[in-house]
Image (cartoon, rainbow, N blue to C red):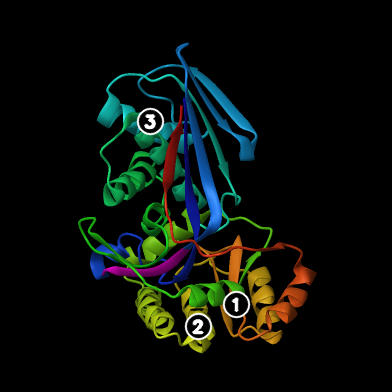
Amino acid sequence: MIIRSKAPLRIGLAGGGSDVSPYSDLYGGAILNGTISMYAYATIIPRFDGKIIIHAYDKNDKLEYDSQMSLPIDGKLDLAKGVYNRIVKDFIKKPLSFELTTWVDAPAGSGLGTSSTLVTAILGAFAEWKLLPLGHYDLAHLAYEIERKDLGMAGGKQDQYAATFGGINFMEFYNDNKVIINPLRIKTKILNELAHNMLLFYTDTSRDSAKIISRQQDNVRQNNQESVNAMHEIKNQAIVMKEAILKEELDKIGEILDYGHQQKQKMAQGITTPLIEDIYKAAIEAGSTGGKISGAGGGGFMVFYCPENVRFNVISALKQFGGALHRYEFVKYGLTTWTIK
């Protein structure tokens, strides 16, 4: 028997950072994001020899343990081990024996929600294997708890929900872990136009998102007004972006992204760098009307809105920075699991 799963990565369109506690607890958060045709994959093959094997092919890393109730959280493939530990603790109540293999289509720290999406994919595979009674909200919340609470990794809530639900979603976050997912009904031609006009550029750098997010959290706790006001503006941009897309006013998207980019820099130190600003300036000079850093910032992927036919000029302008342009499409489906017997 082979159990498989895949969950899509996401592009944050607006509101990024407002889903991070304590801001979302104090003021409420709003996010607009869309899942894309890049994925995290997980495969489980049950074993009968009392062994647990975890193999992350994209990292060329492999671990082997004797079957046990709890695997050590020691910095080595902790996402997979954190999922296993919670599954055994909450549902199975006994050790399991299996081989788990994983792969992610983007590097860790690249700003597309890779870590959370991988947790979601692994959790989905275990749920498929053991027929766990987890709905979409249950699974996304459990993935959030594993990553943020069990493993102590700093971050927000949007990625687990995006990976689970899929599609273009307007997400609302409140205190007491209340989350509301509002799927947007968008015509296929609009989705195609968005994917055509929104360039996804990898800067060939990665970053420690936890450090940036921790600074952002500290700014909220210390009531740093510049940072908090910037987060208010970022949250409002999610509402404005949602309206522009639903009304098919796509010419406004670049301007909304550009304003968000300026505000995001005020949220915490390290969100932007000289290289990021050089790339951003080159894209604007080549015809892009706006863009943003994907995820927490500091490196990874950037997104640029290129209306009409300017995408080719922008692509040419970005070649000087190395990196890579990634083709993608927006996808409507989230976590998918299946079993082959």
Given the image, on which type of amino acid does mark 1 rest?
A: Asn
Q: CA distance from mark 2 to mark 1?
A: 10 Å
Given the image, on which type of amino acid does mark 2 rest?
A: Ile
Given the image, on which type of amino acid does mark 3 rest?
A: Trp
Relative to 215, say whether 40 is above or below: above
Circle 2 sits on which residue?
A: 253
Q: In screen coordinates, is 219 left or right of 77?
A: left
Circle 1 sits on which residue?
A: 197
Circle 3 sits on which residue?
A: 129
The outermost residue toward the right is 320
Q: CA distance from mark 1 to mark 3?
A: 40 Å
Please report the residue visible at 60 percent of the width from the left and 84 percent of the height from the top. 307
Label 2–label 1 contact, CB within 8 A: yes
Label 2–label 3 contact, CB within 8 A: no
For residue 278: magenta?
A: no
Assess disc 3: are there few (<14), some (14-19) or many (≥20) residues with their C-alpha within 10 Å of its C-alpha.
some
Relative to 157, say whether 234 is above or below: below
